Amino acid sequence: MNPKITILLAALIFCVVCAVIAPVSAAGDTPIGVLPSLTEPVTFVTPEPTTVLTTEPTTVPTTEPTTRPTTEPTITITIPTVEPTAVGGGKGYIDTHANVDGASVAFDGSYQCTIAQGVCTVGVSPSGTPVRTVTVAKTGYTSWSGSLSHMPADGEHVSVYAVLNPVPTETITIGPVQTGVIYAQSSPAGAGIYMNGNFIGYSPVTIPNLVPGSYSMRASLNGYTTDTRIVNVYAGQTATYYPTLQPSPPPPRSTGTVKVSSSPDHALIYVDGTYQGKAPLTITLYPGSHAFRLSLTGYSDYTTNVYVNANSNQNLNAIMTPAVYGTVAITSLPGATVYMDSSSQGRIPSSGTLTLYSVANGNRLFKVTATGYNDWMNSVYVQPNTITTINAVLTPVGPNPTPVPATGGFTIVSTPDGAEVYVDNLFQGYTPATLNNIVPGQHQILLKYTGYVDCPTTASVAPGQVTPLAISMQPAPTPTPASSPSLAVFILSLAMVAGICISLRRRF
């Protein structure tokens, strides 16, 4: 081969190799394999690679390393100032006054400042964008919004006054108390407490959320006499039940007896307030003093105290005093006429009270009349040997009567139902009864029912209140029926009659 051609081919190959290796080296890549050895001679021939790099489009990779950042870029945040940039010359001021410090102020929805010591001031350009709405707000308060009267001129202050009101909290309305409470504590403690026959717990115990009314309470403890009574519950109040239990141990504790008789017979016997039966009756009692009361219709009550000794027998014979008549005292308007059972009894004197003596006991119809007043009429039970008081209040006739003072009332229930109700000896109807227009104060209540013992009690009423009463009536003892004549007595009587007839026949 021609030497010139050989040299020319070698030079061409060298140029091609340089053109391939130069971009790789410029990019910072490490040659692989035999490339380092091929680039060794190139370091001595600089014109060729320089010419190739400046003319080839591979100049883009060579500039990348010089523009790549060596550190993270710095972020610059520009905080806007409170005052808007003035568009024209001059500066005015908007003074926002508020009653709550810490409230934020915004112009057309853009925050401007915070209220401090009742005001905040913001500078604005008179020729800038007009402020249309000023809003003042703070958490827990209702927001306030308003408009400016006009934009401030150069150096002028325009004031805005905002009043923030606290956000109203939800109000929970608690209605009036509708229930009451009974607190029961026995002496000694630990007695079982029953209400209306249902076991509640052991004393002391509190019974809450009770509807106002009357409740039958009972305390029971082993070795003691059971206590029973009626407790009235009022709305919003705590009624108390404090039973004191009397020891009642089982035998062999010693007892005594009292044989009670009455003249006439069949008087009702009460011992320590508890009904025992009908005389004649023998009563067994524990040692100690006991109060006896005997009652019989048409007679005055017989009362006495008997001291009972252990292992002793005593006799008590009660002589009942007849009491057929009673006294009636009628209080009403002076000059008013009083009628009893349709018969005139006279007029109310200037003292205001007319007293009638020797009035037969039982129900009597009374009427009190006066000119210009409505008649007062009611049925009154006259008790024997006692003074029965009647307060007959007359109301004027006409559209504008004299105002009546505040009154109260009673709600009375009984066992059994249908008992006659008398308040201050005035017949008021039958149980269950709701009685209104009762004068405040204490009143005598009497319940009567055929076959039951009369039940008197005292109750008070306050103005505007209704007093509940629950009364349990006790059956009157059934009289012991007289034993029918025996057959032998009947035959003997017939024999005697026959004998008399025979003797008379022989005589005639």
Image (cartoon, grey):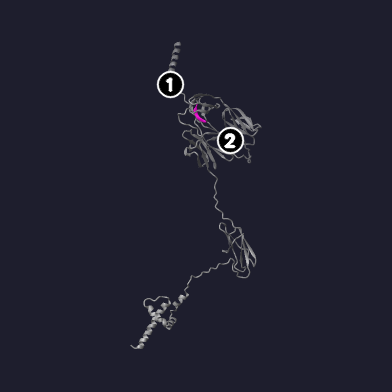
**Which-is-in-front pick, marks 2 and 1?**
2
Q: Identify the disc placed on residue 442.
A: 2
What is the crowding at mark 2: few (fewer than 14 residues within 10 Å), some, or many (at least 20)? few
Farthest residue to the left: give it: 1
Q: Is residue 282 visible?
A: no
Tell me where residue 471 appears, x and y as whole percent.
52, 35
Rendered view: 86 above or below 37: above
Closer to us: 274 or 366: 274
Label 2: which secondary element: strand
Question: In this figure, which residue is indicated by the disc labeled 1?
Answer: 486
Q: Is residue 357 visible?
A: yes
Can you say which quadrant of the picture contains the N terminus? bottom left
Tell me where residue 455 appears, x and y as whole percent.
53, 32
| 2 and 1 marks in contact (CB < 8 Å) | no
Label 1: which secondary element: loop
Tell me where residue 330 appears, x and y as whole percent.
61, 32
The boundaries of the magenta stretch are 273-278
| Amino acid on which the number 1 mark rests in the picture | Ser
Which residue is painted at 47% across and 76% down in the image? 66
| Amino acid on which the number 2 mark rests in the picture | Gln
Tell me where residue 415 appears, x and y as whole percent.
50, 35
Closer to us: 156 or 319: 156
Q: Is residue 220 magenta?
A: no
Farthest residue to the right: give it: 350
On screen, residue 168 versus residue 155, left or right, reads left
Q: Say which quarter of the image contains residue 354.
A: top right
Magenta stretch secondary structure, dominant? strand
Spatial distance from mark 2 to mark 1, Cα to Cα?
Answer: 56 Å
